[in-house]
Image (cartoon, rainbow, N blue to C red):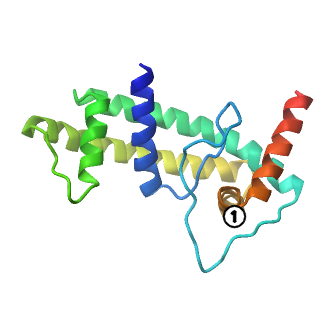
Amino acid sequence: MKMMKENMCVFFSMLISSCFIFSGAFAQEQQPAQEMPAPADAQTGSQESFSDEDIQAFIDVNEKVMEVQKAGEQQMMEAIEKEDIPVDRFNEILMARQQPDQEVDATPEELAAFSKAAEKVMEVQKDLEAKAIKTIEDQGMKMEKYQQIMMAYQQSPEVQQQVQKLMGNADKDN
């Protein structure tokens, strides 16, 4: 089971990073997680200074986004399993297809099941993206601000420290 979860992390990281426009940076253990990267927008650059209030709002919003993401990941796993292809095998085929110089060693039946599952996963993903954006906005944060902080978190050790400091304070308050 542990191996399946690790393989799902690889799959979802690859799938989501290719499609999503934002990221959840914090696992429940408050460690940076292997999640969805923010878009790289070279024109706007990235801001590296945020108020503690902005960072705290980001942390709070991100917790809600993580809930949405976890539910979506479960739906994706179920979509794969419904097509009678093991998740591990789905991941193998996915990784092979993403390497142009690598042949996909799969039977026609596996490829058909993979295609059907991938189509369903992409539908779930679109729904997941919309729900996550709605969650961010429903929490009172603009998507642009969320993306700015996420990008800064991914690129700036100072922002990472600020986030970790505020998360530590939140733990002490609870």
Q: Is residue 62 left or right of residue 72?
A: right
**Which structural element holds mark 1?**
helix
Please state, as top left, top right, bottom left or bottom right, where the N terminus lies in the image.
top left
Residue 74, percent across and down? 45, 30
Residue 131, percent across and down? 55, 46
Q: Which residue is at the front of the view, 99 or 144? A: 99
Q: Is residue 107 left or right of residue 117?
A: left
Looking at the image, which residue is at 59% across and 77% down? 42
Looking at the image, which residue is at 42% across and 56% down? 18
Q: Is residue 101 visible?
A: yes
Please state, as top left, top right, bottom left or bottom right, where the C terminus lies in the image.
top right
Under mark 1, the amino acid is: Gln
- Residue at the spot of label 1: 148
Looking at the image, which residue is at 27% across and 37% down? 90
Residue 85, percent across and down? 23, 30
Residue 133, percent across and down? 59, 52
Say which quarter of the image contains residue 151: bottom right
Q: Is residue 159 left or right of residue 173?
A: left
**In the current view of this chain or complex, which residue is farthest to the top?**
1
Residue 165 drawn above or below residue 158: above
Q: Is residue 75 visible?
A: no
